[in-house]
Amino acid sequence: MTEERPDKLDLIVDAALRDYSNAEPRAGFEQRIFRHVQAAPAARRSYWQFGWAMAAIVLALVILRLDLPKKQPVQEITRVIKQPVPTPPPLPVRTVAKPVKRRSSPPKTDKFPEPVPLTAEERALLRFVQDRPDLARETLSLSAQIEDLTIEPLQIEQLPEP
């Protein structure tokens, strides 16, 4: 339902809108618009200048890339490769035991806890110690010479009150 008679709130809103629409723009409005329009083409021009500058840089990079010396031809490389290379003396061959393949469930043993097989790093260390005991002894003695790190307790002075 619509009322035919406007209530008091409608009258107040209508009066405020009428006053608002009758307001004049501040002084210098036209001058501000003209200055804005005149400044706009300069801004558009700077975009074009930036685009041309980027195009010039890309063109310079392409020219520099084409002007760089090319790689050696394949024929020269093959001549270098065909020269005899001295072969080092053969290394002694050692046989390494293959790791034991386990079944899905390991057999029960009387030992507890069951021994765990050595890892690849542990086997390498063991091989190093067996092959070069003097070097291993020297290396391990260096680690024994390192002193324990001691850190003194932290002392915090109280700040003076402002």
Image: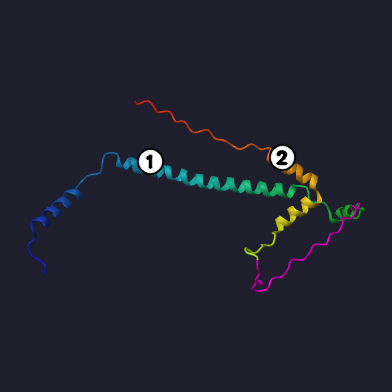
Going 50% across and 33% down the picture, which residue do you hit? 153
Is 141 inside the magenta-drawn segment? no
Q: Which of these two is toward me, 4 or 78?
A: 78
The residue sitting at 74% across, 55% down in the picture is 124
**Earlier residue among tags 2 and 1:** 1
SS for dot 1: helix
The rendered magenta stretch, by its main secondary structure, is classed as: loop
Residue at the spot 71% in from the left edge and 55% down from the top edge: 122
Residue 53 on image: x %, y % = 58, 45
Q: Which mark is residue 83?
A: none
Quarter placement of the N terminus: bottom left
| Nearest to the observer: residue 159 or residue 6 | 159
In the displayed structure, does residue 72 sit left or right of residue 13?
A: right
Q: Indicate the amino acid at tag 1.
A: Arg
Q: In the rendered view, would you say 132 is above or below 146?
A: below
Which residue is under mark 2? 142
Judging by the rendered image, the residue that carries numbered circle 1 is 35
Residue at image point 11% right, 67% down: 2
Mark 2 neighbour class, 10 Å CA radius: few under 14, some 14 to 19, many 20 or more? few
Task: Specify the segment rendered in magenta.
Answer: 86-110
Q: Amino acid at mark 2?
A: Leu
User: What residue occupies the far front of the structure in this picture?
Assistant: 110
- State the image coordinates of residue 65 (x, y, percent, origin top left): 71, 49
Image quarter (top left, top right, bottom left or bottom right) of the C terminus: top left
Coordinates of residue 137 in the picture (x, y in percent): 76, 44
